[in-house]
Amino acid sequence: MIVNSLPGHVGIAIVGGGPVGALLAQRLAASGHDVMAIEARTGTPADPRALALSWASRDTLLEAGLWSDALAATPIEKVHVSQAGTLGRTELSAAELGLPVLGFTVPYEKLAALALERLKTGNVPLALGHTVTGLRQLDRYAQLQLAGPDGAAMLTAGLVILADGGKLVTQLGDIKQTVKPYDQHAILARITPSQPHRGMAYERFADDGPLALLPSGDDFMLIWTQTPEQAAERLAMSDEAFLSAVEARFAGRIGGFTRVGTRASWPLALKTLDSVVSRRVVLIGNAAQTLHPVAGQGLNLGLRDADTLASLLTATPHNRAGDAATLARYARLRRSDAGRVTFFTDSVIHLFESPNPVFKHLRSLGLLALDHVAPLRRGFARRMVYGAR
């Protein structure tokens, strides 16, 4: 519900109208909280990324009315993980967890558009086209300075939730952000297999960087991690040479490819905070952490942030939503899952980047152990679907 004039005060202000912010706004409004969403963009720009959403994430979005056939979601029934040049491999399946599928591949652009549309037409007040330019924290509320279509405005809130890209973190003096560049770029391209993918996703650890293939319609969405120099070379290749390079790194695991679409790349970095809460402020989603795409956990983690915070605030008296004790409890609830997933994702990058033959052999043994020890494999798959809560 787009508002034409801003109130002077709201109980909870959510900065960011993407999937994470929209999920939280829908849940809090349904529980009776006085909540407002603030979104700088009036529409969703073109975005070629595809997301791997777990079955649990799909359930969370469905409950909040943020799932529909319009998403054109592609089921992921199995995930094949292997390392080039070794026998190490394993396969995760939905059947082992008693689930219909492990998850879905969803075009980010479609999910973001659905989230914004739900906010525009739903019962959550939405300050559309408003950018937060300043944030001031006081004991009883936080104060937001906004720039909108009608000029500057001010809004106070008992609790401010940052669910956007995290630019406002620099205005929180008691929170330190750490940025760890990976010196890597992710190449993204839609690629057509010569044979049906049958709902199989692939994670391949090649000597020059990991590749992921996510089933997307009849195609795959390729995410290939390379150094900046290698990424530039791959983008400049002819389509035929690029397809041959991808095929060579899968070494017969896949029957081949017939076509590749437009290629793009972007730099990768790990961004973390030493705390996700501050006075009258809490950070979730990409504002709290930005991960490497290797394990496909970024948005899944952000949705669990929103789900946990929604459940906590629903059970909290409205006038105590922004209290220090409430925010400290949220931080405790999210510490294990966020910490373990972040550590795992970062560790995978370093574990598989070493060309040392000894490490390569040990990695192969680890994948073989995962493949042959069913309880270990199921436990790993369960963490990928439900997190480490």
Image (spheres, rainbow, N blue to C red):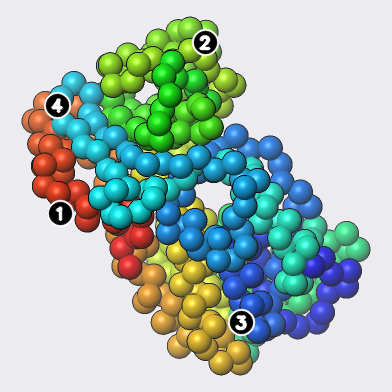
Q: Nearer the N terminus, badge 1 or badge 2?
A: 2
Residue type at tag 1:
Pro
* Amino acid type indicated by mark 2: Asp
State the residue at coordinates (39%, 70%).
334
Query: Rounded to the nearest whole Å, what is the CA distance between mark 1 and mark 2?
Result: 42 Å
Three-letter amino acid code of the residue under disc 3: Ser
Front: mark 4 or 1: 1
| Residue 239 numbered mark, or none | 2
> The residue tagged with tag 3: helix, strand or loop?
loop
Q: Is residue 73 above or below residue 220?
A: below
- What residue is shown with label 4? 87
Which amino acid type is shown beneath numbered disc 4? Leu
Q: CA distance from mark 4 to mark 1?
A: 21 Å
Report the side of 282 relative to 199 (left or right).
right
Q: Which mark is residue 375?
A: 1
| Number of marks in picture | 4
Label 2 CA crowd tier, 10 Å (few <14, some 14–19, many 20+)? some
Does residue 328 sit above or below 260 in this rendering? below
CA–CA distance between discs 2 and 3?
A: 52 Å
Of callouts 4 and 2, which one flags the residue occurring earlier in the amino acid sequence?
A: 4
